[in-house]
Amino acid sequence: MITYKHALASTILAVVVIASIPSAWADGALAVGGGSFGFSRNHESMRTARSVALERCGNDACEIKMTFRNSCLAYARASNGHWGTARRDDEGSARRAAIAECEDRGGRNCEIKTNRGYECDGD
C-alpha cells in the first residue's frame, strides 16, 4: 500500500533527478581573420566555443565575429574578400541571410563557407 508520504517522496525524488540532468551542449562561435575562418558548435560553455573557433581559424588575425546558442549560424565569403554572417532559427534562413549580407557589403559571388555550409547547435 502506497502512503501519501511515500508518493510525495517519490515525486520529490523524480523532480530532483530531472532537474539535475544537464541540458544539451549548445554554445557555438565563429572566428574570422587573415583569410581563414573557424566554427565551433555544441560546446558546454561559450568560453570553450570561442576558444575552439579561434583554434580552428588558425592564425593570429582571427577574431570572434559571432556567437550562437540553440540556433544556426552561416558565414558567406565573396571572391573579392567581402563576407557576411547570419544567425537564424534554421539552416536555410541563416544561409540566405549570410549571402544577402555578404552581397550588401559589396561581395561578388558570395558562397557559404563551412564544412556543412552552415552550423547549427543544440541538435
Image (cartoon, rainbow, N blue to C red):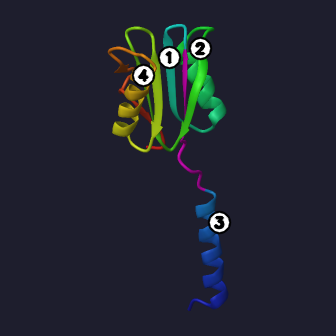
Marks 2/4: CA–CA distance: 18 Å
Q: Residue at x 35, y 32 (%)?
A: 96
Inspect this view and state whether residue 114 appears.
Answer: no
**Residue 65, quarter of picture:** top right
Residue 36, placed above or below residue 66: above
Q: Report helix, strand or loop for mark 3.
A: helix
- Say which label, 3 or 4, has the lower sequence index: 3
Residue 22, placed above or below residue 28: below
Asked if the residue under mark 2 is in contact with the one under mark 1, i.e. CB atoms within 8 Å, the reply is yes
The residue singled out by tag 1 in the image is: 37
The residue singled out by tag 4 in the image is: 102
* Quadrant of the frame with the C terminus: top left
- Amino acid type, label 4: Cys
- Amino acid type, label 2: Cys
**Residue 50, quarter of picture:** top right
The residue singled out by tag 2 in the image is: 62
Residue 104 in picture, x, y percent from top left:
42, 24
- Say which label, 1 or 2, has the lower sequence index: 1
Q: Residue at x 63, y 37 (%)?
A: 45
Q: Report helix, strand or loop for mark 4.
A: helix
Q: Give neighbour class at mark 2: few <14, some 14-19, many 20+ (Cα, 10 Å).
A: many
Marks 1/2: CA–CA distance: 7 Å
Residue 122 in picture, x, y percent from top left:
48, 43
The residue singled out by tag 3 in the image is: 16
Residue closest to the eye, 105 or 32: 105
Q: Which residues are magenta?
A: 21-32
